[in-house]
Image: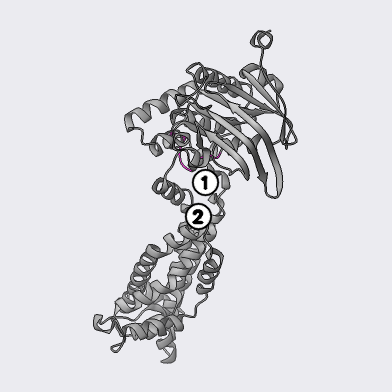
């Protein structure tokens, strides 16, 4: 599905991304459409995190272009309003869980009441009811991932860039995260996530890009019927 | 030694007057030093400009500035023939606070800078991706690094409380007006009044100990 402007949600042309001196990712052309659930599948060092960070405007391309709704990602205001990148090991700000979950609402100037309602809903979906006053430093890895996802959802992000979203999660946390992502996808949100788990890609994605040593080795849609069986 | 404890615990008005005055000067000068110190530290840590490393090195070098040199610089400004002579700061508390502020500023700036550069790179990325703009990034950064900033504050306070050059040159060691613990110790030792000097020395020692305890208690909470 195209954006209102007719441009793809993300469009890369002759994109090259470096990590220090080393070329971490290169692709001649790549399009991601609005509402897609795209899995970046590949082993460690294949460039998954680098691509996600570049899409989130956190890493500058060293060659080529990367656009969000037709605008360069680094200067796109719409990217800042719609998109959140979540680290594999999320950084939870010092303070309480409630402070963290409402942070994105405050920085995006969402009204206080609306922000609190969004935060309550996001915490409910992710099984974080009663966590509001808990100190962020006391959270486990799985809880941190749930808090970070709740923070992204409460911020109103409808383009989620997720680096190994269930990497530190136990089975219960993983189920809650997957259900929250499916629910957000049903509202039309775009999910782009990295994983080295083909099972997770099949469960959640509508399209899988296989990365190998910094380039696209395969790019194909997921057969939902096959994935469900 | 017994006499020293007696002077402290009997509530000797002159001794406690000196202690109170010293702490007041130190508190004011440390607080004033935050005004330029923290913004300079934040700017050095968060902005990438051409002379950043050189400026950071200069600020760092200024932390070792001898107190008498600071005293000399401020003296030349506030002495009767200096550009700020009309303010009447020389041999007055304001002169001491001014000198000590200058002494504390590079410590606050340098330690803030050092602390802020140690923040996890994911922290900045998290703020950016959540749409935080300049002001909310600054507030979140100060909040995140508050333990490091308090450590910088406490270190600066310790430095100004224990210095003698600025107080002597700019305050003139005037009884009941600008006499501080360090200038009183210097004077009383030269006059052979070891008990009073020793009582003030004990207070300085306790302050140094308290400062170290505060810094150590903050260290494990660094980000």
Q: Is A39 rendered above or below residue B189?
A: above
Residue at the spot of label 1: B124
Is residue B175 toward the left or the right of residue A207 in the image?
A: left
Identify which residue, A36 or B113, lies in the foreground.
A36
Q: Specify whether residue B217 is in view.
A: no
Q: Chain of mark 1?
A: B
Residue at 61%, 19% (x, y): give it: A204
Cα distance between the residues tagged 2 and 1: 9 Å
- Residue pictured at 49% horizontal, 38% vertical: A135
Res A61 → quadrant: top right
Judge left or right: residue B72 versus residue A218. left
Asked if disc 2 and disc 1 are in contact, CB closer than 8 Å, the reply is yes
Mark sitting on residue B159: none
Decide whether the magenta segment is chiefly helix, strand or loop: loop
Magenta highlight range: A91-98
Q: Quadrant of residue A30?
A: top right
Q: Residue B93: percent from the left, percent from the top?
A: 30, 77
Q: Is residue A52 magenta?
A: no
Q: Quadrant of the C terminus of chain A?
A: top right
- List x then y, in percent, for residue B141: 46, 49
Query: Would residue A198 appear left or right of A100 to someone viewing this image?
Result: right
Q: Which residue is mark 2?
A: B46
Q: Is A93 inside the magenta-drawn segment?
A: yes
Q: Residues within 10 Å of mark 1 (few under 14, many from 20)?
A: some
Near-viewer residue (B15 or B27): B27
Q: Residue at x 34, y 72 (%)?
A: B25
């Amino acid at each position: 599905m195209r954006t209102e402007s007719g441009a793809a949600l993300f469009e890369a042309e002759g994109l090259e991304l470096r990590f220090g001196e080393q070329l971490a990712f290169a692709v001649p052309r790549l399009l991601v459409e609005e509402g897609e659930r795209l899995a970046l599948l590949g082993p460690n060092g294949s460039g998954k995190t680098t691509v996600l960070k570049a899409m989130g405007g956190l890493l500058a391309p060293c060659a080529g272009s990367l656009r969000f709704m037709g605008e360069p990602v680094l200067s796109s205001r719409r990217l800042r309003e719609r998109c959140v990148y979540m680290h594999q090991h999320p950084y939870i700000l010092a303070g309480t869980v409630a402070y963290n979950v409402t942070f994105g609402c405050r920085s995006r100037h969402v009204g206080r009441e609306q922000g609190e309602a969004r935060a309550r809903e996001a915490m409910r979906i992710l099984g974080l009811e009663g966590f509001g006053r808990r100190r962020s430093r006391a959270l486990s890895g799985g809880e941190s991932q749930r808090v970070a996802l709740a923070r992204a959802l409460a911020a109103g992000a409808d383009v989620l860039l997720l680096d190994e979203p269930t990497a530190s999660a136990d089975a219960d946390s993983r189920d809650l995260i997957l259900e929250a992502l499916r629910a957000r996808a049903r509202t039309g949100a775009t999910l782009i996530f990295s994983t080295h788990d083909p099972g997770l890609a099949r469960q959640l994605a509508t399209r899988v890009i296989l990365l190998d040593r910094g380039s696209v080795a395969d790019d194909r849609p997921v057969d939902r019927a096959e994935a469900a069986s | 030694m017994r006499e020293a404890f007696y002077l402290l615990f009997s509530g000797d008005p002159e001794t406690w007057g000196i202690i109170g005055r010293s702490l007041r000067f130190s508190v004011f000068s440390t607080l004033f030093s935050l005004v330029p110190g923290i913004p300079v530290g934040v700017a050095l840590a968060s902005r990438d400009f051409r002379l950043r490393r050189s400026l950071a090195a200069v600020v760092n070098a200024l932390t070792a500035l001898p107190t008498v040199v600071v005293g000399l610089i401020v003296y030349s400004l506030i002495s009767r023939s200096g550009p700020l002579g009309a303010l009447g700061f020389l041999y007055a508390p304001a002169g001491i606070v001014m000198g000590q502020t200058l002494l504390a500023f590079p410590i606050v700036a340098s330690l803030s800078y050092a602390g802020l550069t140690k923040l996890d790179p994911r922290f900045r990325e998290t703020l950016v991706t959540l749409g935080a703009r300049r002001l909310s990034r600054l507030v979140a950064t100060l909040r995140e690094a508050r333990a490091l900033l308090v450590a910088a504050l406490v270190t600066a306070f310790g430095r100004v409380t224990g210095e003698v050059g600025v107080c002597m040159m700019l305050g003139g060691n005037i009884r009941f007006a600008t006499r501080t613990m360090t200038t009183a110790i210097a004077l009383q030792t030269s006059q052979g009044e070891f008990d009073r000097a020793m009582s003030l020395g004990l207070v300085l020692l306790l302050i140094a100990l308290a400062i170290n305890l505060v810094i150590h208690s903050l260290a494990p909470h660094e980000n």
